[in-house]
Image: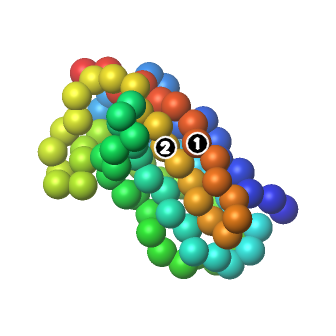
Amino acid sequence: EHYALSQNYPNPFNPTTTITYSIPKDNDVILTIYNTNGEVVNTLVNIHQKSGNYKVIWNGSNNSGRRVSSGLYYYQLKSGGFSLTRKMLFLQ
């Protein structure tokens, strides 16, 4: 088992997209969405999780619940010493 962060699907997306990831051991997990300026748009996961495979659905909203604008976004998984970032495209 190993850490993994899959490409979101569908991509491009509207209105929702699914992000899947795996963690090999129990650990704190943070899954964050960023805009192209590197600003946090939404924190989807910020908890301690058991080892396994996970799926999160993002509805294109920010931390305040407002819909974000069309464009390129980044999602980043951090857990233990692991960190990986991928791109996704939101189209309205």
Instruction: Name the quadrant of the N terminus.
Output: bottom right
CB within 8 Å, label 1 to label 2: yes
Q: Amino acid at mark 1?
A: Thr
Instruction: Indicate the position of residue 68 as horizontal and vertical percent values.
Output: 23, 35
- Looking at the image, residue 72 sits to the left or right of residue 78; the answer is left
Q: In the rendered image of this protein, does residue 26 appear above or below residue 80?
A: below
Q: Amino acid at mark 2?
A: Tyr
Mark pair 1, 2: CA separation: 6 Å
Q: In the rendered image of this protein, does residue 32 appear above or below residue 34?
A: below
Q: In the rendered image of this protein, does residue 14 appear above or below residue 66?
A: above
Scheme of colours in the image: rainbow
Instruction: Indicate the position of residue 70 as horizontal and vertical percent values.
Output: 28, 23
Instruction: Name the quadrant of the C terminus.
Output: top left
The front one of 44 and 74 is 74
Q: Residue at x 47, y 37 (%)?
A: 74
Q: Which mark is residue 85?
A: 1
Q: Residue at x 37, y 57 (%)?
A: 43
Q: Furthest residue to the right?
A: 1
Which residue corresponds to mark 2? 75
